[in-house]
Image (cartoon, rainbow, N blue to C red):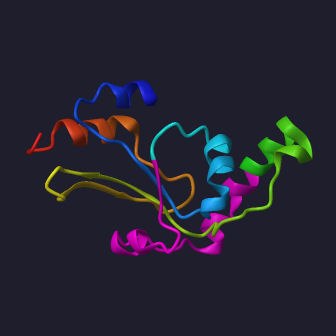
Amino acid sequence: MRARLDDLPDTDVVLMTFTDPTNIAAYRQRHAVDLPVVIDAGRSSYRAFGLGRGSLARIWGFRAARRYAEIFRTDGLSGLRRPTDDTRQLGGDFVIDPNGALIYGFWGEGPDDRPSIDDIVAAVNEAPTR
């Protein structure tokens, strides 16, 4: 993904999270984040973008159980960690033009629901103000 994002001229890619600022170093390492990170601990941006919370069934359903089983099989108990953040907070992916207008939005319906990198790159390349 990183190589594709580096091909976009004049584009800033930023990760926004609501994790506690004291956890950001561990967060960056755990998720292999090499992007600039903005912390919105109060989640005002999440609310402004209409990012709600997922249902318990969607967040902790079959997909989550299968993923935890994979982690356990690969890493044993050392791979499992107690969540430190709100696991029900839904995420999204957004492209905002230089004038502040939202030109692409993807509102996730669960923790594994994300657009393809191709969709994001296409949105940036098709932006009218580029």
Residue extending farthest right: 77
99 horizontally vs 106: left or right: left
- Residue 32 position, x and y percent, is 60, 37
Above or below 34: residue 103: below
Q: Is residue 66 left or right of residue 41?
A: right
Residue 24 x, y percent position in the rendering: 62, 53
**Residue furthest to the front:** 22
Residue occupying image coordinates x 77% and y 50%: 68
Q: In the rendering, at what x and y percent does residue 120 appear?
A: 32, 41
Rendering coords of residue 51 (x, y %)? 42, 70
Q: Quadrant of the C terminus?
A: top left
Q: Nearer the viewer, residue 24 or 115?
A: 24
Front position in the image: 29 or 59: 29
User: Outermost residue, left direction?
Assistant: 128
Q: Quadrant of residue 82?
A: bottom right
Looking at the rendering, the stretch of residues picked out in magenta corresponds to 37-66
